[in-house]
Image (cartoon, rainbow, N blue to C red):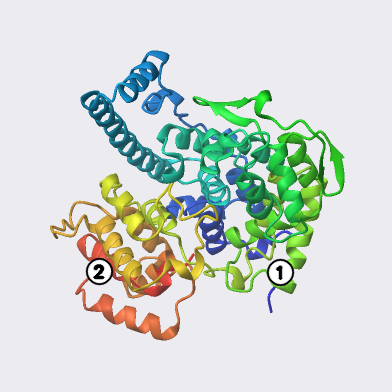
């Protein structure tokens, strides 16, 4: 029977399997030695180590790392040249200007690929896995797509902002997203003005970002919210409030009337009970269980308790996350191996847990796209649906090929070099688990790599496959064994 208690996990239930579950959900997994280090701690200390990541040193990337001027606004002189070309119908000059725009488009798309690869590598190498895990969560929640923004540097700035506030305060995040150039462009609020308000941002703020679809608001609330957000735009890379575009007339939102602006609109929404319930339900599905129909009636008891804590903390996220990640419910068997890894989780998790080389990030980035999760390019403002939709015949084929590539270096053209990577840490973990009894290697490898307990039939099949390798699981044979275990359907779960 599922334990729905938010009471802390019992010390007697805290072990390597529980620590591995925590690492996979609150981050992207970790090598055996990190799992053992967490398992040796008290549960509260292990959770605190991941959650209070500010204590862990990190190399911050400056905003100057990427070129902010590819999409800079034109100068007065450049505008004059463009206007003159149109006015004089100078086709040669117009063609030259178009070629320059096409070149900037190409440069910006290339920089976006560089930013994608940079973030993937950061997730793999970070000493703050929960910060990156929550940055990825907020990227899917406040989903913003490059194709609607067409400014790679603005996408980078948004990513930096989400990272900075990843486990901070949700209300602060909402206020920041209303000032984010990428979001303002993506939802067309930069074109919203008095007399012609654009409803996109107001609608998604209620429907997807804060309240949830159909959760207590009306079309009139959206229209009035859109009026409140008029004038919220950006100038180059920074937020700008243009008073001459703002509708300064009285507006009625949720029955409250005043000369509201966008900040007031957000505060009115956040004063309600629904946001805490909505966000805690999304956190539950992201960190605990995302099976169809969940959260159901029983799970909502957990969500309700977390939402109450969120309201008591004025939307601070850490107390909510700490309670959830320490709870008996989080570690209940029903919630382990209950989620399908997203493409990014698969890539980052395999690299962190197995210790395989990072390989070519361009190839890995292209594979995440083929698997259905291209960073900075969610399919819509709803983000990625995820869950069972991650898996189909096409994506499963790419998943398995990618894992072989990560483990062996074999790409589409072949050319595996099984000796190019030494899986010594995996071998050491097996020795620790089996006390040197090689006959137990196959079972120990399943326990080490899979998120779930393999069935007796699966264990029997895997033992037979390991025996066919013709010797102890070390060196190249261990590399081959890892290719086999990561090809199992169970490996797709976390």
Res 423 seen here: yes
Q: Residues within 10 Å of mark 1 (few under 14, many from 20)?
A: some
Say whether residue 144 is left or right of residue 395. Answer: right
Q: Is residue 69 left or right of residue 198?
A: left
Is residue 487 rendered to the left or right of residue 447?
Answer: left
Tell which circle, 1 or 2, labels the residue nearer the N-terminal end. 1
**Tag of residue 299:** 1
Q: Residue at x 38, y 72 (%)?
A: 392
Q: CA distance from mark 1 to mark 2?
A: 45 Å
Q: Nearer the viewer, residue 353 or 211?
A: 211
Left or right of 21 in this view: 214: right
Instruction: Name the mark on residue 137.
Output: none
Q: Quadrant of residue 486?
A: bottom left
Residue 344, image x, y percentages:
42, 54
Residue 168 visible in rendering:
no
Q: Which residue appears at 58% of the width and 51% of the height? A: 141
Relative to 83, say whether 292 is above or below.
Answer: below
Instruction: List the single residue furthest toward the top.
Output: 77
Q: Quadrant of residue 287?
A: bottom right
Q: Which residue is mark 2?
A: 472
What secondary structure is found at the residue carrying circle 1? helix
Residue occupying the point 48% across, 71% down: 388
Q: Quadrant of the N terminus?
A: bottom right
Vertical order, 203 against 233 (above or below) = below
């Amino acid at each position: 029977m599922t334990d729905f208690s938010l009471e802390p996990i019992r010390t007697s239930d805290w072990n390597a399997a529980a620590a591995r579950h925590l690492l996979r959900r609150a981050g992207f997994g970790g090598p055996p030695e990190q799992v053992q280090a967490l398992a040796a701690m008290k549960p509260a200390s292990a959770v605190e180590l991941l959650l209070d990541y500010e204590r862990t040193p990190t190399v911050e990337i400056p905003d100057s790392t990427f070129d902010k001027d590819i999409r800079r606004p034109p100068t007065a002189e450049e505008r004059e040249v463009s206007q003159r070309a149109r006015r004089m119908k100078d086709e040669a000059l117009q063609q030259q200007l178009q070629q320059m725009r096409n070149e900037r488009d190409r440069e910006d798309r290339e920089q976006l690929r560089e930013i994608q690869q940079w973030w993937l590598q950061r997730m793999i190498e970070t000493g703050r896995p929960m910060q990156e895990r929550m940055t990825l969560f907020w990227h899917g929640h406040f989903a913003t797509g490059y194709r609607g923004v067409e400014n790679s540097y603005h996408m980078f700035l948004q990513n930096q902002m989400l990272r900075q506030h990843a486990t901070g305060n949700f209300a602060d995040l909402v206020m920041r997203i209303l000032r984010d150039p990428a979001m303002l462009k993506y939802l067309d609020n930069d074109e919203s003005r008095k007399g012609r308000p654009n409803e996109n941002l107001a609608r998604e703020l209620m429907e997807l970002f804060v309240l949830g679809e159909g959760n207590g608001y009306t079309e009139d609330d959206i229209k009035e919210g859109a009026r409140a957000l008029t004038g919220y735009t950006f100038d180059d890379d920074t937020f700008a409030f243009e008073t001459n575009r703002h509708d300064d007339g009285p507006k009625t939102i949720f029955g409250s009337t005043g000369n509201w602006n966008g900040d007031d609109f957000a505060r009115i929404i956040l004063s309600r009970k629904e946001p805490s319930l909505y966000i805690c339900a999304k956190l539950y599905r992201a960190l605990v269980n995302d099976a169809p129909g969940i959260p159901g009636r029983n799970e909502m008891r957990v969500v309700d308790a977390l939402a109450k804590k969120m309201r008591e903390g004025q939307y601070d996220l850490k107390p909510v996350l700490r309670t959830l990640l320490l709870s008996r419910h989080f570690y209940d068997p029903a919630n382990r191996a209950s989620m399908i890894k997203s493409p990014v989780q698969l890539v980052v998790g395999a690299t962190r847990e197995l210790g395989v080389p990072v390989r070519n990030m361009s190839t890995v980035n292209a594979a995440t796209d083929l698997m259905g999760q291209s960073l900075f390019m969610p399919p819509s403002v709803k983000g990625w649906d995820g869950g069972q939709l991650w898996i189909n015949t096409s994506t499963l084929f790419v998943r398995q090929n990618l894992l072989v590539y990560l483990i062996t270096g074999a790409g589409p053209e072949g050319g595996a070099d099984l000796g190019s990577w030494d899986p010594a840490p995996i071998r050491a973990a097996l020795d620790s688990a089996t006390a040197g009894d090689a006959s137990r290697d196959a079972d120990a490898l399943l326990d080490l790599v899979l998120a779930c307990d393999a069935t007796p039939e699966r264990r029997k099949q895997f033992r037979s496959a390991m025996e066919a390798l013709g010797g102890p699981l070390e060196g190249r044979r261990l590399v081959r064994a890892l290719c086999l275990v990561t090809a199992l359907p169970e490996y797709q779960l976390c």
